[in-house]
Amino acid sequence: MICWTDSLEIAINLSDKYPDIDPKTINFVDLRNMVMQLDEFEEGDSKCGERVLEAIQMNWIEEVE
């Protein structure tokens, strides 16, 4: 099970699931929806805020570089 606070693990999963997406260009609404569609993700969107999404995006950028 992945939670919002698992930003690195989320980023790794996003990188694997969406290899053709540039994480630098994604907006937070799309990012939130993509995270919630991950098979391992089982938490709602109530704990998702801008800082959480920024952390996920930064980890995803680092993962693909």
Image (cartoon, grey):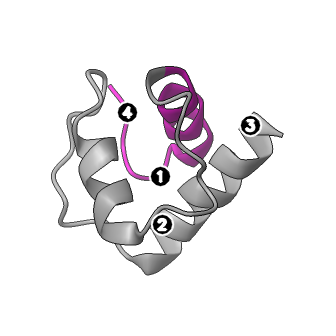
- Give the distance between the C-alpha atoms of the residues marked 4 and 1, in whole angstroms: 8 Å
Q: Locate residue 11 relative to residue 39 in the image: left or right.
A: right
Residue 8 at x, y percent in the picture: 62, 40
Q: Does 64 sit above or below residue 61?
A: above
- Give the distance between the C-alpha atoms of the residues marked 4 and 3, in whole angstroms: 17 Å
Residue of label 4: 2
- Give the distance between the C-alpha atoms of the residues marked 1 and 3, in whole angstroms: 17 Å
Residue 4 at x, y percent in the picture: 39, 51
Quadrant where the N terminus is found in the figure: top left
**Circle number at residue 63:** 3
Q: Earlier in the sequence, mark 4 or mark 3?
A: 4
Q: Locate residue 38 relative to residue 51 in the image: left or right.
A: left
Q: Which residue type does callout 4 highlight?
A: Ile
Magenta region's main secondary structure?
Answer: helix
| Contact (Cβ within 8 Å) of mark 1 with mark 2 | yes
Q: Which residue type does callout 1 highlight?
A: Thr
Q: Secondary structure at mark 1?
A: loop
User: Which residue is situated farthest in the front direction here?
Assistant: 20
Mark in the foreground, 1 or 3: 3
Magenta residue span: 1-16
**Circle number at residue 5:** 1
Residue of label 2: 52
Quadrant where the C terminus is found in the figure: top right
Q: Earlier in the sequence, mark 1 or mark 2?
A: 1
Mark in the foreground, 1 or 2: 2
Identify which residue is drawn at 31% across, 23% down.
40
- Give the distance between the C-alpha atoms of the residues marked 2 and 4, in whole angstroms: 13 Å
| Contact (Cβ within 8 Å) of mark 2 with mark 4 | no
Q: Which residue type does callout 3 highlight?
A: Glu
